[in-house]
Image: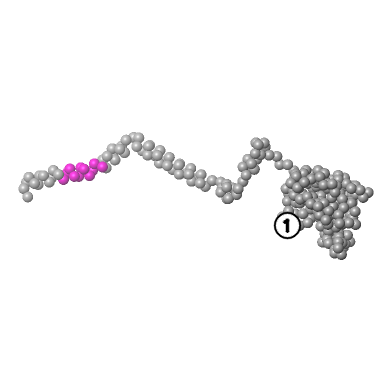
Amino acid sequence: MSDQNKGFQKEEAPKTVQGAQGVPSTWKRLLAKKWVFPATYVAAAAIILTLMWVYQDVGTKKVSQEDLGIKVSSDKTTGNSPDGAVAVNAPAETMQWPVKDKSLVDISIPFYDTNATNEVKQAAMIQYNDQLTPHTAIDLKSKDGAAFDVLAALSGKVTAVEQNPVVGNLVEITHSNGLISVYQSLSDVKVAKGAEVKKGDIIAKAGRNDFEKEDGVHLHFEVRQAADNAAINPETILNAKQ
């Protein structure tokens, strides 16, 4: 190899080394700047704080009723009525005796209660067409035997008005609390099916029927559960203050 070639190689080799050292030299010059470290620290701190906020937000998120599939009316959740008025928790209406003055009437036929005494059970059996039937109501009769006004025991909607050949004129009222009140042996019915009545409204007068013929003029008053039509002893739920 000639001396000229040797000299050429010696000149080129250092250029290659200098080129490889150019990258770290650039980083060294960059890191030598005074603002680099503070800027890097601030950026890293911002990333860390952002991750912490995200983690805390996920950990503290409340599960809403909608997330659980529970449908909630907007009126109930806001506590306001549709017209913007503030809702007030009104006390639940209690059932009253279906007469103006309970002291003027007697229970002529009681409700058949399986837990009652034999004497009460016997009095609560109705004989009709040579068959004995447990009485699923209470019969109210005025002390002087006269007709009297029959009142709605609770506010609700009239869901039946019928004229039955056995039980006489009948009115049925369905209430919002899951109960149904039934009034039989009526005369002079004053309400129609579909009407809304208030507690204490006059719906008819006491009359006669064929099923309890021997009871004369009276009101047959039943209370039933809307869910299964099971009869309830009215005396257990009637408002004692009336």
Q: Work out whether residue 185 or residue 103 is closer to the camera in this orientation and state it.
A: 185
Q: Secondary structure at mark 1?
A: loop
Q: Work out whether residue 6 or residue 199 is closer to the camera in this orientation and state it.
A: 199
**Residue at 63% in and 40% down:** 78
| Residue 219 forms part of the magenta stretch | no
* Left or right of residue 237: residue 85: left
Q: Residue 231's spot in the image, x, y percent? A: 78, 56
**Residue at 56% in and 49% down:** 67
Give the quarter of the figure containing the C terminus. top right
| Residue 17 forms part of the magenta stretch | yes
Q: Residue furthest bottom?
A: 130
Question: Could you tell me if residue 234 is visible in this image?
Answer: no
Q: Can you say whether 14 is above or below 113 in the image? A: above
* Left or right of residue 36: residue 122: right
Q: Residue 20's spot in the image, x, y percent? A: 22, 44
Q: Residue 118's spot in the image, x, y percent? A: 87, 63
Q: Work out whether residue 134 or residue 20 is closer to the camera in this orientation and state it.
A: 134
Q: Residue 192's spot in the image, x, y percent? A: 77, 46
Neighbor class of circle 1 (other Cα within 10 Å; few <14, some 14-19, many 20+) is few
Question: Could you tell me if residue 20 is visible in this image?
Answer: yes
* Left or right of residue 21: residue 192: right
**Residue at 66% in and 39% down:** 81
Magenta-colored segment: predominant secondary structure: helix
Residue 133, image quadrant: bottom right
* Left or right of residue 24: residue 142: right
What amino acid is at disc 1?
Answer: Asp
Q: Work out whether residue 62 or residue 28 is closer to the camera in this orientation and state it.
A: 62
Question: Where does label 1 land, which residue?
Answer: 228
Q: Residue furthest right?
A: 144
Part of the protein shown in magenta: 13-23
Q: Residue furthest left?
A: 2
**Residue at 87% in and 62% down:** 127
